[in-house]
Image (tube, rainbow, N blue to C red):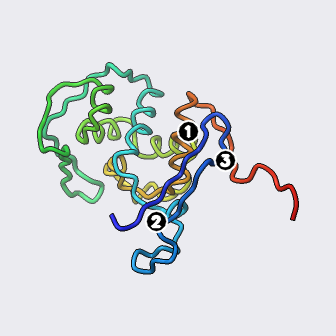
Amino acid sequence: AKNAALVAIDPKSGQILSMVGSKDYFDAAIDGQVNVTIRERQPGSSFKPYVYLTAFTKGYIPETLMYDVETEFETAEGKSYKPQNYDGKFRGPLSMAESLAQSLNIPAVKTLYLVGVRDAIDIAKKLGVQGLNEPDRLGLSLVLGGGEVRLLDHVHAYATLATGGVKHPMAAILKIEDS
């Protein structure tokens, strides 16, 4: 990576403790004057908890078995989609909890298939994610980071997860004492 961004939010208050939008503001080679924390980027596998949470709201439980085996899906366009795990291996039957803990792609895609893209986006939005306003253009790769979100929103949603679902409004400025 040539550039980096960071957001830290206190989950108990919603206060933004740290926000760094670029590694070097003055480095044009890395587009340093872009605040990456408020630009939409693909979140990768860090989107998976939203999908599993959606499954839990629909009655699935952490012990629900998923089969981590080679699986081929047909997309809305009639194309074939065959997700792979990061190491190219298959692990057979695993619980949803184990699948998430190991960040396995195939069970995650199957979980999204079961719960639906729109419902997973709805849960992510309830937690604090904004954007993802065109669910019809998003498919099963959403769970692998195939949609774009702002880092600031993503961290806010994770803060909501950390509080067990209590969402605090984000606060960047606590008070202004004088001019």
The three-letter code of the residue at mark 1 reads: Ala
| Position above or below: 104 against 74 | above
N-terminal label among 3 and 2: 2
| Label placed on residue 127 | none
Q: Which residue is mark 2?
A: 23
Residue 36 lies left or right of residue 171; in this view the side is left
At 44% from the left edge and 32% from the top edge, which residue is drawn?
53
Residues packed near mark 2 inside 10 Å, few (<14), some (14 to 19) or many (20 plus): some
- Relative depth, front residue between 137 and 108: 108
From where the camera sits, is residue 21 visible? yes
- Relative depth, front residue between 134 and 95: 95
Residue 67 lies left or right of residue 49; in this view the side is left
Residues packed near mark 1 inside 10 Å, few (<14), some (14 to 19) or many (20 plus): many
Contact (Cβ within 8 Å) of mark 3 with mark 1: no
Residue 145 lies left or right of residue 129; in this view the side is left
From where the camera sits, is residue 132 visible? no
Contact (Cβ within 8 Å) of mark 3 with mark 2: no
Q: Which residue is mark 1?
A: 159
The three-letter code of the residue at mark 3 reads: Met
Q: Provide the secondary structure element on which disc 1 rests.
A: helix
